[in-house]
């Protein structure tokens, strides 16, 4: 299955989901595997259309801005903020569940490489029976998918 096929499959599903919309009003989603976000969106859409549970997992931290205070002279100042580290650092970008088994998918595009924390997560997941896959393209993901679903009946 190509990304064009996925786009057509999504369009047909949207037509069924929104039967009252005229055909010309149903948007056609264009999928790409040139960026990490594009590939992630394609994989999530395919999992949804296939009936599998899939979710994107974010482990990035966030910045909490400092409080704004007015001092004794009447000047408004912004205090120093703080960085809150993320949770589940090293976890794959996507978590997919097929027939009770967890698959963690790490998306790597271009020169992006697996970090030490990601290698540690992969080791812990696979030692407990989960499956970890590093995916660089749509074709690579789809080949993994065919392997996973050939072993799984759902």
Image (cartoon, grey):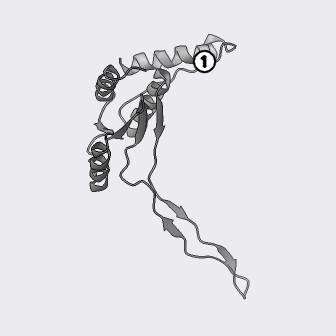
Residue located at (46% from left, 40% from top): 56
Quadrant of the rendering where the N terminus is positioned: top left
Residue most toward the bottom? 72
User: Vertically, is 107 above or below 138?
Assistant: below
Q: Label 1: how many residues lie within 10 Å, few (<14), some (14-19) or many (20+)?
A: some
In this orientation, which residue lies closer to the viewer: 88 or 93?
A: 88
The x, y position of residue 145, in whole percent, is 34, 25
Residue located at (72% from left, 88% from top): 72
Residue located at (45% from left, 54% from top): 60
In this orientation, which residue lies closer to the viewer: 90 or 71?
A: 90
Position of 18 compared to 9: left or right?
right
Question: Where, by quadrant of the figure, is residue 148 drawn?
Answer: top left
User: Vertically, is 121 above or below 84?
Assistant: above
The x, y position of residue 83, in whole percent, is 49, 66
In this orientation, which residue lies closer to the viewer: 110 or 89?
A: 89
Position of 98 compared to 137: left or right?
right
User: Vertically, is 127 above or below 133?
Assistant: below
Query: Is residue 126 visible in the rendered structure shown here?
Result: yes
Q: In the structure shown, which secondary structural element does the residue marked by tag 1 occupy?
A: loop
User: Vertically, is 68 above or below 99?
Assistant: below
How many numbered discs, if any? 1
Quadrant of the rendering where the C terminus is positioned: top left
- Residue under circle 1? 26
Position of 114 compared to 97: left or right?
left
């Amino acid at each position: 299955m190509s990304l064009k096929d996925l786009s057509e499959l999504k369009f047909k599903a949207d037509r069924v989901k929104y039967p009252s919309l005229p055909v010309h009003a149903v948007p056609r989603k264009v999928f790409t595997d040139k960026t990490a976000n594009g590939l992630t969106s394609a994989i999530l859409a395919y999992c949804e259309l296939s009936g599998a549970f899939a979710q994107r997992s974010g482990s990035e931290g966030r910045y909490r801005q400092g409080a704004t205070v007015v001092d004794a002279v009447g000047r408004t100042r912004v205090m120093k903020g703080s960085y809150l580290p993320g949770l589940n650092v090293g976890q794959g970008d996507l978590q997919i569940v097929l027939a009770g088994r967890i698959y963690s998918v790490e998306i790597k595009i271009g020169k992006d490489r697996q970090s030490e924390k990601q290698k540690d997560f992969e080791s812990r997941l696979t030692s407990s029976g989960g499956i970890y896959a590093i995916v660089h393209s749509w074709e690579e993901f789809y080949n993994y998918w065919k392997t996973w679903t050939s072993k799984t009946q759902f």
